[in-house]
Image: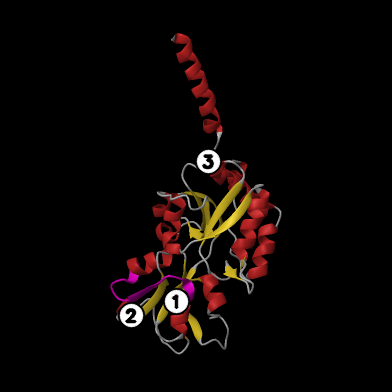
Amino acid sequence: MTNWITKTLITATLIAAPLAATPALADDNQTVRLGIDVPYEPFVMRSADGQLEGFEIDLGNELCKRAKLDCTWVEQPWDGIIPGLLARKYDAILSSMAITPERERQVLFSLPYYNTPSVWITARDRNIDIADKASLKGLSVGVQRGTIRDVYVTQEYGDVLDIQRYGSSQDVVNDLKAGRLDLTFEDFPIAVDAIDFRGDNSPYKQVGPSIKTPTSIFGKGAAMAFRKRDKALAAKFDQAICAVYADGTFDKLMHQYFDYDLSVRPSQQDCAQ
């Protein structure tokens, strides 16, 4: 009887050992799935033949190469992007996600890889004073639902502006151009690319200053997001972010898409960890 029990325990141990030694997908240095919201030009868009392209696609592919990981892209609408990560639809988010205290309670962030302000845009012939809140009563503003710009406008102007929320940034821009919105509050690079408000002949203009604060809303910059347990995977991408900054690759990619600086260079201390 004793010999039978001993043999059974040994057999069970041998069966269980491979299972215990098999790491989760996000830790096994094999295929890593990256969640991204499409489109968000010029960070991500679709080419004429249907392929994903853009600054974050190029950067993400480069980071994966530096980390020696085989990565694939998984499309996910923004308002479900963190739930999708937690539900294991993908292993990380690389989609212009700002580091904020609220998100830090849900996910683990990498080092930031870029940082940009947000801007108010309106038609060039409109006279709108963002600083005069009373004068904004009843005006409409478009924002992408669930973004930090949605949070900011709701918190700071929800009592005066008619906030229209959209599933994508492109939908916001479309309604602004169609005259269905008085204002939009948009990420600076997106506004430059989709609205071209800086041109002298543009029918649109920026009103008020560019906004980067408070950090409780706008965070410390955009970063990759991981499940809390995937510290080893996050560390691999942190080192990859340090590497693309150190050898000038980030600057090279940045200048392919932007005529302004959105870098947020990691410190030597961050890269030494």
Determine crowd level at label 3: few under 14, some 14-19, many 20+ residues with C-alpha closer than 10 A.
few
Q: CA distance from mark 3 to mark 2?
A: 51 Å
Residue visible at 62% across and 65% down? 55
Residue stretch in magenta = 156-170
For the residues marked 1 and 2, what is the alpha-carbon distance in whole angstroms? 19 Å
Residue type, mark 3 in image = Ala
**Percent from the top left, x then y, of residue 182?**
39, 83
| Nearest the eye: 210 or 29 | 29
Tell me the quarter of the picture where residue 30 sits: top right
Q: CA distance from mark 1 to mark 3?
A: 39 Å
Identify the residue position indicated by label 3 in the image: 24
The C terminus lies in quadrant: top right
Instruction: Compare residues 74 and 125 and report the one nearer the observer.
Output: 74
For mark 1, give the secondary structure: helix
> Which is more foreground, mark 1 or mark 3?
3
- Kindly identify which residue carries mark 2: 136
Judging depth in this view, the residue of 49 and 233 nearest the camera is 49
In the rendered view of the protein, which quadrant contains the N terminus?
top left
As helix, strand or loop, the secondary structure at mark 2 comes to helix
Q: Secondary structure at mark 3?
A: loop
Task: Give residue 244's quadrant in the image.
Answer: bottom right
Compare marks 1 and 2 and give the one earlier in the sequence. 2
Mark in the foreground, 1 or 2: 1
In the drawing, what numbered circle is on residue 121? none
- Disc marking residue 172: 1
Q: Amino acid at mark 1?
A: Val
**Dot 1, crowdedness within 10 Å: few (<14), some or many (≥20)?**
many
Query: Which tag is nearer the camera, tag 3 or tag 2?
Result: 3
